[in-house]
Image (tube, rainbow, N blue to C red):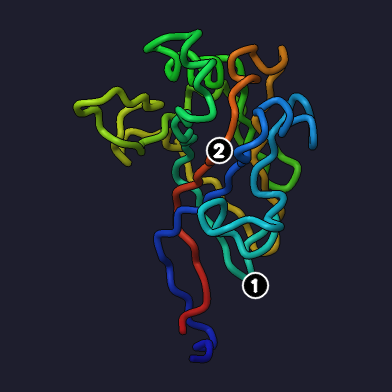
Amino acid sequence: MGKVMGVKEKTGFPTYDAFFVPKDTTFEAEMQKRDPRIIRFFVDIQNKTKLDTNLQASGVFPSLNTFEARAMRVVVSSLNEETNRELIKKLGVAGESIVLAELIYNSVITLFVGEKIMIEVPTFYFPAGAGVSPGSFLVTNHGEPDPMATFRFAEPVMIDPQQNFRVEMQFPLGVPGNLAKVNGPLRIWVILDGYLTRDAQ
């Protein structure tokens, strides 16, 4: 179906990108491949699956689309029990909570649009608003598992057509010890919730 010239549509479109630690790698080793203190999101989509990202091009929205970011969140997958047996044994029942706390209290999130900083605060400001509700087994979440329980921008952050954007997670004091030793598979997603304006079809 072709484009309808001069007609735009606005749709809710959460945009996400993930940092992935494969099964036979540690968190620290995966960071060393790129930058030992910074994880960059939305800048590299090569060899990523739809579970990792829904961007079609690195750091920009396609064509003449604009994006109005209303909220941002950070979602962390749970520790894999099989590959983290030793770490879980060492840290005990609270192991997953300790690792998650090391991540959110020792890192800073920065949203860049163009080269302008739109927000820069510690990661604990961005609860996940996602996850499995606790039941008969222990589940650790970064915040309440409710999409409304997320950080919302006071004013929408506009990303214009073909404008570069990225999110950086920095560890100013380095990656904490227990987090550094976590074995994959592990994913950290950054999600921008908002509205995409595009040509109608």
For the point 42% across and 9% down, which residue is it?
A: 92
For the point 50% across and 48% down, which residue is it?
A: 69
C-alpha distance separating marks 1 and 2: 34 Å
In percent of width and height, residue 197 lies at 50, 66
In percent of width and height, residue 82 lies at 48, 30
Number of numbered callouts drawn: 2
Q: Residue under circle 1?
A: 63
In percent of width and height, residue 112 lies at 67, 40
Left or right: where 29 falls relative to 196: right
Binning the other alpha carbons within 10 Å of mark 1 as few (below 14), some (14 to 19) or many (20 upward) gives few
Binning the other alpha carbons within 10 Å of mark 2 as few (below 14), some (14 to 19) or many (20 upward) gives some
Amino acid residing under circle 1: Ser
Q: Residue under circle 2?
A: 185
Which of these two is toward me, 185 or 195? 185
Which of these two is toward me, 77 or 137? 137
Tell me which numbered mark, 1 or 2, is placed earlier along the sequence.
1
In the picture, the disc for residue 180 is none
In percent of width and height, residue 142 lies at 41, 26
Which of these two is toward me, 98 or 68? 98
As helix, strand or loop, the secondary structure at mark 1 comes to loop
Q: Is residue 101 above or below residue 158?
A: above
Left or right: where 51 falls relative to 146: right
Residue 171 location, quadrant: top right
For the point 67% across and 58% down, which residue is it?
A: 60
Amino acid residing under circle 2: Pro
As helix, strand or loop, the secondary structure at mark 2 comes to loop
Residue 190 location, quadrant: top right
Left or right: where 128 falls relative to 110: left
Q: Is residue 110 above or below residue 178?
A: below
Residue at the left extreme of this rendering:
136
Left or right: where 33 falls relative to 73: right
In front: mark 1 or mark 2?
2
